Amino acid sequence: MGGMIPLSDASRRPAHFPVITLFIIVVNSIMFLLELAQGDSFVMRWAVVPARITAGHAWITILTAMFMHGGWLHIIGNMVFFWAFGPEIEDAMGPVRYLAFYLIGGLVATLAQVAASPKSTIPNLGASGAIAAVMGAFLVTYPRDRIKSILFIGWFARVTLIPASLLIGVWFVIQLFSIGAVTNANTGGVAYLAHVGGMIFGAITARLFEVPERIGGYVER
């Protein structure tokens, strides 16, 4: 068994403080604390239930669900990935464009999952669709950057540098191969189609949101 956990971009650092990335992490954290405090009733009220969306109800949950998580490992994993790729893309787009990109990416990802299971009554929640959009943007913007990552091989772990194109590419292929098993399930699982939808959106639209002058403003490490 093996795996990779990205930590940060080792090739460059943002020229501006990632205020929106940090803000989004804080909002996710607050929402998770509310989930812990209020339990299942909070989740059922604010998570996306595809059957309700296709019936024309609870559309606000498309927004709220992207700031919710199913457990400690879920939120920690998502926020680690987000912090590894978010600051550089925020700097490339600017705060306002980046926030719009993130929210639209999450919307597209959620709708992709709803379209796959329109009658499902299982709550969908998580930031991973929006984060996948950020990863898609990173892939087309900085494919040659080296990502400082923890690489797991069996019981061994080491910190190494992995090209962004390889790390994100492998992650995307895993999502593609995992779609079938989840879309045919009747119980909860990972919304892989949301990951794929978010990633494709990010890769296709990143250049529309980015400001070329800001991309050139990075300081190499």
Image: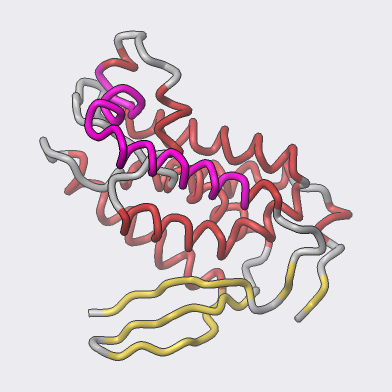
Q: Residue furthest top?
A: 56
Residue at the spot 38% in from the left edge and 53% down from the top edge: 75
- Which range of residues does the magenta coloring cover? 22-51
Check the picture and name the quadrant holding the C terminus: bottom right
User: On the image, which quarter does residue 105 sit in?
Assistant: top right
Residue occupying the point 69% across, 43% down: 98
- Rendered location of residue 74, percent (x, y): 33, 54
**Towards the viewer: 106 or 44:** 44
Q: Position of residue 117 (x, y in %)?
A: 24, 28
- Is residue 130 placed above or below 116 in the rendered structure? below
- Secondary structure mostly seen in magenta is helix
Find the residue positioned furthest to the front. Answer: 37
Magenta stretch holds residue 31: yes
Q: In the rendered image, which quarter is residue 46 located in?
A: top left
Q: Position of residue 32 (x, y in %)?
A: 39, 43
Q: Nearer the viewer, residue 20 or 119?
A: 20
User: Residue at (37%, 14%) from the top-left corner?
Assistant: 58
The quarter of the picture where residue 61 lies is top left
Figure quadrant of the N terminus: bottom left
Residue at the (32%, 61%) spot, across then down: 174
Residue 2, position in %: x, y? 28, 79
Q: Nearer the viewer, residue 219 or 23?
A: 23
Q: Is residue 42 left or right of residue 109?
A: left
**Render colour scheme:** secondary structure
Of residues 27 and 120, which is closer to you in this image?
27
The residue most toward the left is: 186
- Can residue 6 be found in the magenta stretch? no
**How many discs mark residues in the rendered view?**
0
Please determine whether, in this image, residue 198 is positioned above or below residue 144. Answer: above
